[in-house]
Amino acid sequence: MTDRKTLLADSLARVEERISTACASAGRRREEVTLIVVTKTYPASDVRLLAELGVRHVGENRDQDAAPKAAECSDLPLTWHFVGQLQTNKVRSVVNYAGLVHSIDRDRLITSLSQAAVRSGRETGLDCLIQVALDAESGERGVRGGVAPDGVAALADAIAKAEGLRPAGLMTVAPLAGPYAGRPRAAFDRLMEIATDLRAAHPTANMVSAGMSADLEDAVAAGATHVRVGSAVLGVRPRLG
């Protein structure tokens, strides 16, 4: 085993232990939580090693990095999650490799994704998660993207009506400002309340993507179905130029 693979295996094992322990503490089965390893800034060679170690869900937040990486790894049994802010001029590229987009926060993006998904001839609909900004007031977007909680229902309805798309659930990032700043568990509990309301209208929109390297335990305790972990598996990211 190469030094890099050994390092990744050790880090992955520690993250798996954290998730398992958090599930046990919350009275949940480990199978209820899906680990998405966010590989932004890291090479396709790392993705290959992770796949050899059993990882099946990979996250990316920049299309310019993700598209060539996904193409290079197209032979691997992976589901690609686009987890970053998505510009409409990138949607045609993203729909070619992403199985899920976690950052839906405006009608224009839904329209662009729908058009691109139809043009691409995808055999299955593109699963879309609405990004909820818990630091945003009504009608506003969050500092790191996302729609205010009272905008979720309308976006979900728009996704459900859009050809080629499916409402899959919600995503959030623990906010750095506002009433939930420094309170990730409270933030994730609030997200779960919003998710319950969403499922009442769209029963299949049952994904809750929350929690990263620093706060995955809080997300699991609240009920998240997916956690997005990068640095805890891959190490501290190199600075982008």
Image (spheres, grey):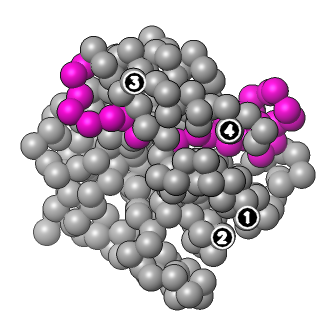
Residue at the outermost top position: 89
Residue 56, given in percent of the width and then of the height, sits at 27, 57
Q: Is residue 96 above or below residue 192?
A: above
Q: Are marks 3 and 1 in contact (CB under 8 Å)?
A: no
Q: Amino acid at mark 1?
A: Asp
Which amino acid, by three-letter code, is at mark 4? Ala
Identify the mark nearer the N-term, 3 or 1: 3
Q: Residues within 10 Å of mark 1 (few under 14, many from 20)?
A: some
Residue 163 is marked as 3
The magenta stretch spans residue 15: no
Residue, x 68% and y 38% (percent of image)?
152
* Image quadrant where one finds the N terminus: bottom left
Residue 16, given in percent of the width and then of the height, sits at: 40, 75
- Sequence order check, earlier mark of 3 and 4: 4
The disc at residue 222 is: 2
Horizontal and vertical percent position of residue 104: 56, 32
Tell me the element at label 4.
helix
Tell me if 143 is positioned left or right of 39 in this view: right
The answer to whether marks 1 and 4 mark residues whose Cβ atoms lie closer than 8 Å is no
- Of the residues shown, which amino acid type is indicated by label 3? Glu
Magenta highlight: main SS: loop
The amino acid type of the residue labelled 2 equals: Ala
| Labelled pair 1, 2 in contact (Cβ < 8 Å) | yes
**Image point (36%, 35%), residue name:** 126
Figure check: 113 above or below 155: above
Image: magenta residue range:
120-148
Tell me which numbered mark, 2 or 3, is placed earlier along the sequence: 3
For the residues marked 2 and 3, what is the alpha-carbon distance in whole angstroms? 32 Å
Separation of marks 1 and 2 at Cα, in angstroms:
5 Å
Kindly indicate whether the residue at mark 4 contacts the one at mark 2 (C-beta within 8 angstroms). Answer: no
Q: Earlier in the sequence, mark 1 or mark 2?
A: 1
Disc 1 or disc 4, which is closer to the eye? 4
